Amino acid sequence: MGMTRAKRYANHKGGRKYDAEGKEKAKVEHEDKAEKEEASRVFREVWERCKAHEGYVEKKRRFIEEQKAWDREQTHIEPGIETDGTTGKPTRKKRKTLDAD
């Protein structure tokens, strides 16, 4: 269980945020709430320490550089395809509708 899930269990007994109809349940007080909030706080503290770690920061920087390079390679557009003019991505053309006679 991570920070977000622990927080959900703190706010909603049983961890279910939505009811059977898909509507969000109200937050309720329950006997395990303090324990789940503490777990969420602990996860957040560890996450913050990880984000400050030099090794993590360097690996994340390299990952983002590699991801951007990969994205650039994937956006190659074939000649003759209309682009939006800003991102270089193809524009979506509207479909022609058939008139019912």
Image (spheres, rainbow, N blue to C red):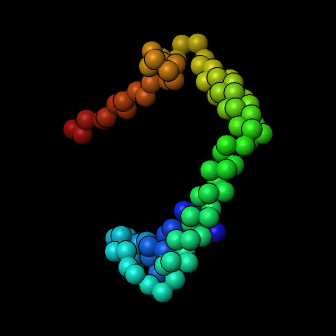
Question: Where, by quadrant of the figure, is residue 71 drawn?
Answer: top right
Q: Is residue 3 left or right of residue 57?
A: left
Question: Where, by quadrant of the figure, is residue 23 drawn?
Answer: bottom left
Give the quarter of the figure containing the N terminus. bottom right
Kindly tell me whether residue 59 is visible in this rendering.
Answer: yes
Q: Does residue 77 lie above or below 4 as drawn?
A: above
Image point (66%, 45%), residue name: 51
Give the quarter of the figure containing the C terminus. top left
Image point (45%, 15%), residue name: 85
Q: In this view, does 41 lie to the left or right of 101?
A: right
Q: Does residue 48 lie above or below 31 as drawn?
A: above
Q: Depth check: 24 or 6 in front?
A: 6
Q: Depth check: 81 or 48 in front?
A: 48
Image point (65%, 27%), residue name: 68
- Residue furthest to the bottom in view is 31
Q: Depth check: 57 or 15 in front?
A: 57
Residue 41 x %, y % = 56, 64
Residue 90 x %, y % = 50, 23
Residue 81 x %, y % = 52, 17
Kindly tell me whether residue 74 is visible in this rendering.
Answer: no
**How many numbered discs?**
0
Residue 49 x %, y % = 67, 50
Question: Where, by quadrant of the figure, is residue 52 drawn?
Answer: top right
Q: Is residue 97 left or right of residue 3?
A: left
Q: Does residue 86 lie above or below 71 as drawn?
A: above
Image point (60%, 70%), residue name: 39
